[in-house]
Amino acid sequence: MFSDFPVSETVQKRHSVRTYDPRPLSEQDLEKLTAYAKTLQTPFGIPVTVHVLETGDASTKKLGTYGVIKGTKTFLGVTVPKGALSLEAVGYSFEQLVLYATHLGVGTCWLAATFDRKAFTGAMNVRDDEWMPAISPIGYPAEKRAISETLMRSGMKSNQRKDWKELFFNGDFRTPLSRAEADAYAQPLEMLRLAPSATNAQPWRVLRQDGAFHFYAKVAEGRGEVDPPIIQRVDVGICANHFCLTAQEQGLSGTLKTTEAPANIDIPDGFRYLFTWTEDLA
Ligand SMILES: Cc1cc2nc3c(=O)[nH]c(=O)nc-3n(C[C@H](O)[C@H](O)[C@H](O)COP(=O)(O)O)c2cc1C
């Protein structure tokens, strides 16, 4: 699936926007976003649905973000049938929409925690057999961030990312993958590194082995409805989108699949295998 925007440039431009200009999103931009949302395909063929919500009128005034998001009343939400790789599919495809919005000059901010989940879930008629992992405000970024946003960013060190040696491995998990060894894949991996993640935790770990890239989630604790936890699965889906789109941009065509996790290697505590990218054979 092609992206319709310059990937590396857009990835580097994107940042979370919590402070918006009060002017509403233009009908044209909203139309472009909803049309693009309908074309989104996930690597695992799982249907992901994007909803548009306008808050603030009598029926939707409860749809709040505890003051975290200022200046816009328009939100996107995303739902998916519960199942294996559904959450990774949400991360992958909703992030592609986030990048497309960035390309249009529209601000976004993944929200998985700081919003009234019950009210938004009700407004989207989310069924028991579906997940609604996240929403995002959309609108035009204000010229100046609210102080609360600046404080939030500095608390989470949102402008920083972990080093390569903590994230990418060559052959086994004892050997870091250097930029030089990554060769043509240095750019896809660098764009992956810049991806957004909940609390900027960057739970993704990638192991290169025999030309394949194996994606893992590093879980702090395996608890809750699924293991790895919902949000870390979404995060790894997001980073995979940056990797795949950048690889495509570089002319490296490949496919994401769930194959067998690599055997005969020591897996650090808390690492959970999710899926593998392999180059398509010509
Ligand atoms: C899955 C996911 C969930 C997030 N949830 C929230 C949230 O509930 N509230 C919030 O203010 N930011 C949330 N964020 C935004 C992150 O804090 C932000 O992406 C991170 O700090 C990096 O900053 P950046 O997006 O500007 O690069 C979330 C991001 C992701 C990817």
Image (spheres, rainbow, N blue to C red):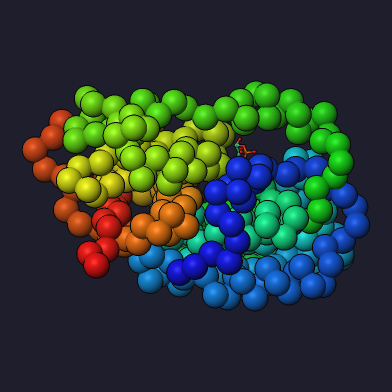
Q: From the viewer's perspective, is 69 left or right of 23?
A: left
45 to 214, vertically: above or below = below
187 to 39, vertically: above or below = above
Quarter of the figure with residue 84? bottom left
Which x, y percent locates residue 76? 67, 61
Q: Quadrant of the N terminus?
A: bottom left
Which x, y percent locates residue 118? 64, 55
Q: Which residue is more in the foreground, 251 or 32?
A: 251
User: What residue lies at 27% left-to-right and 63% top-to-bottom?
Assistant: 280
Can residue 30 be seen here? The reply is yes
Which x, y percent locates residue 227? 33, 45
Residue lying at the far left in this picture: please name it. Answer: 264
Q: Quadrant of the C terminus?
A: bottom left
Q: How many marks?
A: 0
User: What residue lies at 91% left-to-right and 57% top-to-bottom?
Assistant: 23
Can residue 117 be seen here? The reply is no
User: What residue lies at 55% left-to-right and 49% top-to-bottom?
Assistant: 8
Q: From the viewer's perspective, is 133 left or right of 240?
A: right
Figure quadrant, ligand 1: top right
60 to 9, vertically: above or below = below
User: What residue lies at 33% left-to-right and 40% top-to-bottom?
Assistant: 183
Which x, y percent locates residue 119? 68, 58
